Image (cartoon, coloured by chain):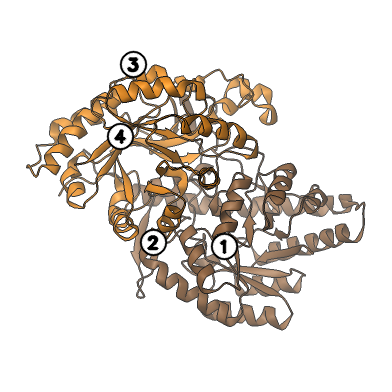
Chain colours: A orange, B brown
């Protein structure tokens, strides 16, 4: 009927989190290889992670590092080699160089293009299909009509994020470390990022805010996870589940990166119910309670503007 | 021989940089390059630029590096064919699908994969070469050693900007949507062409939201004094001999959105510097230090004014379309 997926960074989160609402899990943090015990940079942890996911009868997709430099290609290739020996259901790539590497290796697994793959057109999707891509995550700036156009005209699966903070920009180094007291002392050139001394300050919530001078609520907010900056507001499409189903879209995703324990479970349950009703052709329930729960989980509010040709931070309710 | 390419943000600027010694000029098409319309050229101006360059034995590159809508692609191809017919020798493109379409229809033209492609490694370069790129524009942050590795990995022209940021940090352009997250509008013109406010990727100006004062806080406590999110690139020169030795084929002067006077002076200095390097084994670039420092100052002043203007637009638009309260 449809697939609902989310992301899990490491084994600890996989063991402790509630993911029963999901059909599939994207394993790994694609933004930061130094994230603790990250599936995307620890081949020795893949088998254990996969075992847990398969025991729950879910699909497992392995995320690859999104912005590898020349010096990263070797260890990423080692990870790929290890993963190819295991029953993963797909790789997720953001980097076109890695996509080429997978093809050169004769990879027969499906490949999903991630959010930083910069997919804007159906013609690009067609090119990527030649490299083994079966699913694309269109750039967050695209409207729902554009997303559907790509799905229809490239005959490819599209992943439609329905909830969570939108990845807006990615870094090769850690913004938190660079601007911490430690980073300031080390100087810009010798920042600790990548040298094995990460103190994992990203386990605390870091926010960027542009406030009004009168001290009222900030105009703009962003959440920073170190190597990635996310929208301050949480994308929310629960009011539009019936429309998504009506558009023929079938693969939905909840962003979980940087969220507290329990977020994926609470959000997933709400969307599982809403999408199931929509795909069964049942009338949508009054969204008030669901929206209140989701708004309670979103410190800076909800948004979905990109999908309706507005600024990303705007929110459009059901008319 | 390395090619020095300079910007033509206006017809006047395009002609000035060619007169000052640039081997080629790059110009953006209104609505199709990563700038606002004021720094792009209309078809008449593009035609005149091409004629001006060809008459002097020089080249023109057309910047069509937005990430277009799927439905715009036929219009995109039609324009590229038109400019190639007028004599443009190359195109700067970001969208992989668009790149493939151009290569299929116009195999003789040069395709420069835009900096918006966000290259981070030599496998990326091999991918782009396979799709049809003849030049790859590398991001502002790459080291000489990385460039050398890329050059060795792929038979493709290497193009670098003559300004750069310290290594690392937010990947911009190419992997950033912060501007359109806060302020964004889309409209169609009479020909059915999409136009955008707030998204450089899609054909407007980046509104420079990274350059306002941000409070960085952890668990509700301000972490440090207000700060910008991203470091701005600066003009560079000292490493130029090493870059050329690493295999750089094309040097790109930035500044489509700067004044003609500033860009003309930058081209004048870099033309002399490049010629000095090409003429001697051990060039002394210290003679350019003072001029470069002056140019950096002028650059920062003009950039600051532009950033403030764009940021003000972003804030005004953001407030105008304040989110519907739940």
Gap between marks 3 and 4 measured at Cα: 17 Å
Mark 3 or mark 4: which comes first in sequence? 4
Q: Residue furthest left?
A: A283
Q: Residues within 10 Å of mark 1 (few under 14, many from 20)?
A: many
Residue drawn at (23%, 28%) of the image: A21
Please provide percent x and percent y for residue A166: 38, 39
- Residues at badges 3 and 4 in contact (C-beta under 8 Å)? no
Q: Which residue is mark 3?
A: A16
Gap between marks 2 and 4 measured at Cα: 27 Å
Q: Residues within 10 Å of mark 2 (few under 14, many from 20)?
A: some
Q: Which residue is mark 2?
A: B69
Q: Which residue is mark 4?
A: A5
Please provide percent x and percent y for residue A118: 45, 50
Q: Which residue is mark 1?
A: B132
**Subunit under mark 4:** A
Give the position of the N terminus of chain A as an image quadrant.
top left
């Amino acid at each position: 009927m449809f697939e609902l997926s989310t992301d899990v960074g490491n084994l600890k989160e996989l063991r402790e989190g509630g993911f029963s609402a999901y059909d599939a899990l994207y394993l790994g943090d694609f933004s930061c290889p130094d994230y603790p015990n990250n599936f995307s940079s620890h081949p020795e942890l893949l088998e254990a992670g996969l075992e847990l996911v398969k025991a729950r009868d879910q699909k497992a997709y392995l995320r690859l590092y999104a912005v590898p430099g020349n010096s990263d290609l070797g260890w990423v290739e080692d990870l790929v080699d290890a993963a190819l020996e295991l029953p993963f259901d797909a790789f997720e790539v953001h980097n076109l160089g890695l996509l080429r590497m997978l093809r050169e290796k004769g990879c027969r697994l499906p490949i999903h293009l991630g959010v930083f793959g910069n997919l804007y057109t159906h013609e690009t999707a067609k090119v990527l299909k030649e490299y083994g891509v079966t699913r694309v995550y269109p750039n967050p700036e695209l409207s729902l009509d554009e997303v559907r156009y790509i799905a229809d005209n490239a005959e490819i699966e599209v992943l439609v994020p329905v909830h969570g903070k939108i990845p807006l920009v990615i870094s090769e180094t850690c913004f938190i470390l660079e601007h911490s007291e430690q980073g300031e002392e080390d100087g810009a050139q010798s920042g600790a990022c990548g040298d094995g001394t990460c103190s994992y300050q990203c386990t605390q919530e870091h926010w960027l805010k542009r406030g009004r001078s009168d001290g009222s609520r900030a105009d703009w907010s962003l959440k920073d996870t170190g190597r990635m900056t996310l929208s301050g507001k949480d994308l929310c499409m629960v009011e539009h589940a019936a429309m998504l189903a009506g558009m023929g879209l079938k693969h939905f995703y909840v962003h979980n990166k940087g969220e507290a324990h329990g977020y994926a479970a609470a959000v997933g349950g709400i969307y599982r119910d809403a999408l199931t009703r929509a795909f069964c052709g049942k009338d949508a329930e009054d969204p008030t309670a669901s929206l209140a729960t989701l708004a309670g989980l979103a410190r800076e509010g909800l948004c979905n503007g990109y999908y309706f040709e507005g600024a990303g931070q705007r929110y459009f309710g059901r008319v | 021989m390395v090619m020095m390419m300079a910007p033509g943000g206006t017809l006047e600027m395009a002609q000035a940089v060619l007169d000052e010694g640039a081997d080629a000029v790059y110009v953006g098409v209104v609505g199709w390059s990563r700038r606002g319309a004021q720094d792009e050229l209309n078809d008449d101006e593009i035609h005149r630029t091409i004629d001006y360059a060809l008459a002097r034995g020089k080249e023109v590159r057309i910047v069509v590096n937005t990430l277009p809508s799927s439905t715009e692609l036929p219009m995109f191809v039609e324009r590229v064919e038109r400019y190639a017919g007028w004599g443009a020798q190359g195109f700067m493109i970001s969208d992989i699908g668009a790149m493939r379409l151009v290569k299929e229809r116009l195999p003789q033209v040069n395709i420069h994969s835009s900096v918006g492609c966000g290259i981070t490694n030599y496998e990326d370069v091999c991918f782009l070469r396979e799709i049809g790129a003849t030049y790859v524009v590398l991001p502002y942050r790459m080291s000489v050693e990385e460039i050398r590795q890329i050059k060795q990995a792929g038979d493709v022209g290497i193009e670098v900007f003559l300004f750069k940021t310290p290594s690392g940090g937010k990947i911009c352009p190419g992997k950033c949507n912060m501007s359109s997250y806060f302020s964004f509008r889309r409209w169609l013109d009479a020909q059915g062409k999409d136009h955008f406010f707030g998204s450089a990727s899609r054909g407007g100006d980046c509104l420079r939201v990274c350059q306002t004062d941000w409070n960085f806080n952890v668990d509700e406590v301000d972490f440090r004094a207000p700060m910008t999110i991203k470091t701005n690139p600066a003009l560079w020169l000292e490493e130029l001999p090493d870059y050329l030795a690493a295999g750089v084929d094309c040097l790109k002067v930035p500044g489509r959105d700067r004044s003609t006077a500033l860009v003309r002076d930058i081209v004048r200095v870099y033309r002399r510097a490049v010629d000095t390097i090409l003429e001697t084994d051990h060039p002394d670039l210290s003679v350019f230090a003072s001029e470069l420092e002056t140019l950096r100052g002028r650059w920062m002043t003009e950039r600051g004014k532009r950033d403030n203007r764009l940021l003000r637009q972003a804030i005004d638009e953001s407030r105008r379309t304040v989110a519907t309260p739940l």
